[in-house]
Image (tube, grey):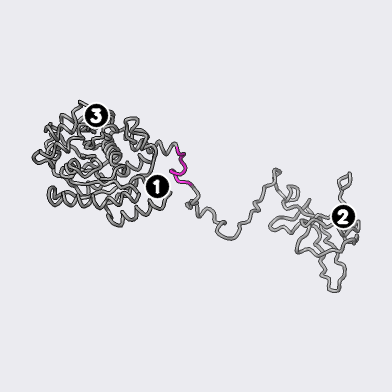
Amino acid sequence: MHDDGRYDDPRVTGSASDPVSRETDHPSWPREVPGDVSTRPADCDPVVRREPPATGVARAVSGSTPAPAVRNAPDDGGVVPARSEVAVPHQPTPAGVPDAAPGPVPVTDTTTTPPGSYGRVATEDAYVSRETPTREEDDPPLAMEAMRAVQILNPSGEVTMPRPERTRVMCVANQKGGVGKTTTTVNLAVALALHGNRVLVVDLDPQGNASTGLNVPHHTGVPDVYDCLINSEPLEEVAQAVEGIPNLWCVPATIDLAGAEIELVSVVARESRLSRAITGYPGHFDYVFIDCPPSLGLLTVNALVAAQEVLIPIQCEYYALEGLNQLISNINLVRQHLNPRLEVSTILLTMYDRRTRLADAVEQDVRNHFGDKVLQAVIPRNVRVSEAPSYGQSVMTYDPGSRGATSYFEAAQEIAERGVKEPVGRNA
């Protein structure tokens, strides 16, 4: 490049090793022999700018029409003269178009529509890409957790879960310990009470964990379920309202209940003592949950006689399945001799760990054996569920946005819907 802005054409200088930019070539132009100076047009710069033929654009500059290009196809290896036309811009100038108003040159959209499905335009405005996030995916995690918390806590107090026509007395039983009986009882009761159902929890375990989870006093000297079983105290004098949870009452258990099985041996109609206490309650409850001890003694038999339904929490491990056959056998014995209306209505899988194949195998075995009795909701392992009792709360109020609270809420909703479709109960 020279100081005056000119470029040396390699065809003029004779340097054939310097190629001309490929942008100056066009398939319709003839080839030129490098070094032939005679092919240079006389009215242009040393480097001829070659533009591809324009379509649909007026080729007029200052009112004059350029001479057509001379194209001689060589058939004997002769030299082909170059095009002798001046480079024409793609857009006409105001001076070259009559009656054209001066102003900015309009820009023509030269974008071409590629072949295929990407060229579809306004006719497919309704199409939404699958990569477009839904509202749930678009919301941040904290917002989703807050929405779940509001749904579970139900601050409006409306009846959002259906109420059964008659009282449903459910016994939460499994002779294996540590499968989540007390945790299931407390959280299902709180979930149903928060959504408009009247619920009574009977703590029949001498450890009193259900009373602890509901923050109900159960120290020595407090009237408890022992007085109902041994001293025939009315249930309404023993039941306590749960603080902070409307429509929820609890019959606590103290350490005195540990000796109740020995004392009940000599009592007349020892298997139906709890059933009489629940039947004689003057008020009406939608649900009565009985938290059983991890044994098959007289306390568990009293719960099976008083209940109409059995809810069995099953931990997703092999040992939980091993003891299930003995529990089913005892339930069948109680049904044959003491309570013909007793049935296993609900199976709930707890402590599910999706990272292990064992949990999946246990779930499939239980579903294949019990069928529709197994709830679709599965309770996962969640640290919030274990932390809540240390604060005297259920996970529904301790961390309502956690996975554990959401799972128990779904389980309670499923139980409530099943109760409406197939109402069971004997006392109104």
Residue 256 vs residue 262, the one in the foreground: 262
Quarter placement of the C terminus: top left
Q: Amino acid at mark 2?
A: Asp
Report, in whole angstroms, how far the alpha carbon at label 3 lies from the one at label 1. 33 Å
Residue designated by label 1: 353
Residue designated by label 3: 218
Residue 155 vs residue 237, the one in the foreground: 237
Q: Amino acid at mark 1?
A: Asp
Q: Amino acid at mark 3?
A: His
From the top left corner, tell me how far across and down residue 182 is, in percent.
28, 39
Residue 256 vs residue 199, the one in the foreground: 256
Please determine whether, in this image, residue 89 is positioned above or below residue 213.
below
Left or right of 49 on screen, residue 354: left
Residue at 57 percent across and 60 percent down: it is 116
Residue 416 sits in quarter: top left
The answer to whether the residues at label 3 and label 2 have Cβ atoms under 8 Å apart is no
Please determine whether, in this image, residue 163 is positioned above or below residue 246.
below
* Residue extent of the magenta highlight: 133-141
The answer to whether the residues at label 3 and label 1 have Cβ atoms under 8 Å apart is no
Left or right of 86 on screen, residue 384: left
Residue designated by label 2: 9
From the top left corner, tell me how far across and down residue 159 is, in percent.
26, 38
Mark 3 or mark 1: which comes first in sequence? Answer: 3
61 in the magenta segment: no
Q: How many marks?
A: 3
Dot 2: what SS?
Answer: loop
From the top left corner, tell me how far across and down residue 200 is, in percent.
21, 36
Dot 1: what SS?
Answer: loop
Mark 2 or mark 1: which comes first in sequence? Answer: 2
Report, in whole angstroms, how far the alpha carbon at label 3 lies from the one at label 2. 103 Å
